[in-house]
Image: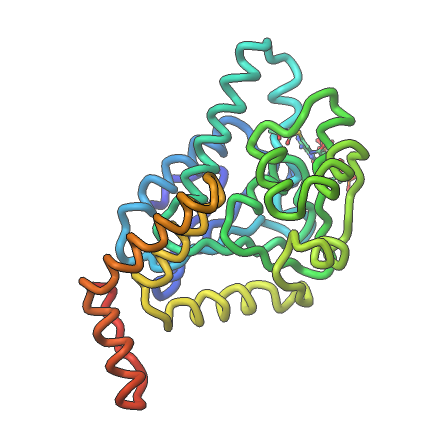
Amino acid sequence: MSDYQNLTFENQDGIGIVTINRPKALNALNADTMGELDTLMDALAKDASVKAVIITGAGDKAFVAGADIAYMQPMTAVEGRAWAKYGQAVFNKIENLPQPVIAAVNGFALGGGCELAMACDIRIAADKAKFGQPESSLGIPPGFGGTQRLARLVGKGRAKELLFTADMIDAAEAYRIGLVNKIVAPEELMDAAQAMARKILSRSPLGVQVCKAAVNEGLDTDLETGVAYEAEVFGLCFATADQKEGMAAFLEKRKANFTGK
Ligand code: CAA
């Protein structure tokens, strides 16, 4: 996993750290970067040695300042649609990774950068981070899932305000409206993301995996279908060693030793 030009990947004791690495362009997402992200997500989905993933941006200024505007500017309508579909497919892979994924938002998360953060399960932001969907100022809507995930995360009214005004909001406002889970000092960002990942890893891996799947599945459907899915995965868990161990450990007043089996 080391041949990437536009991102870096490191497995730190089971936590995969993905860093988008084009700091001169504020980590803007061009075709090569998206291709590498796509390849990496396919590899991570199959890599049992990576138990959780953290996505961040290189440098101290940006998480990701959006899709690459220079790359997109000459596109035809057909190319624009293909680009949006490709970006959506890559971000869907992130959203549907079996592992929990945390965005460690270290700076600007604009356009495709905000969309990348929203495709992650949890967002932790440095207090200097800035969020926004400025696409309406470029003559386009967000194309990598922003119109859909933003409204699901912060509600229709707030999403429309951000989309229509193209305003940038600071981390405190992003926290207030539910776009980020937690705010920390910039120098504490990676430690905070690691600590969150380690806490999740101390829980039953299968329990976490089915929670993720049930939330994702449920938000794409009606309540009745969502709770039916929940009942199925709830039942399935009773066929796992993690369920037997987790409940036995509680009853025996000891710490559970989960195996993910
Ligand atoms: N695409 C391409 N290049 C970008 C970029 C982007 N999204 N964002 C920043 N850059 C480049 C700049 O062009 C500049 O390059 P040069 O040094 O070669 O001129 C470099 O990164 C540094 O940027 P600035 O000089 O602009 O830095 P700043 O501190 O003055 O401003 C900023 C920072 C407010 C983030 C500003 O760069 C900005 O507004 N960037 C664009 C944000 C944006 O509109 N994002 C949405 C893109 S569209 C999209 O993402 C569609 C989609 O959903 C798929």
Residue 13 rendering spot, x and y as whole percentages: 35, 66
- Left or right, 125 with respect to 233, comes to right
Image point (54%, 53%), residue name:
103
- Left or right, 29 with respect to 204, comes to right
Q: Residue furthest bottom?
A: 253
Colour mapping used in the image: rainbow
Up the image or down, 183 lies above or below 164; here it is below
Image point (34%, 59%), residue name:
51
Up the image or down, 72 lies above or below 253; here it is above
* Figure quadrant, ligand 1: top right
Image point (35%, 56%), residue name:
209
Q: Nearer the viewer, residue 110 or 6?
A: 110
Up the image or down, 81 lies above or below 210; here it is above
Q: Nearer the viewer, residue 206 or 102?
A: 206
Residue 12 rendering spot, x and y as whole percentages: 39, 63
Query: Which quadrant of the figure contains the N terminus?
Result: top left
- Left or right, 80 with respect to 13, comes to right
Q: Nearer the viewer, residue 172 or 24?
A: 172
Up the image or down, 72 lies above or below 17; here it is above
- Where residue 173 sits, quadrant-wise, is bottom right
- Where residue 78 sits, quadrant-wise, is top right
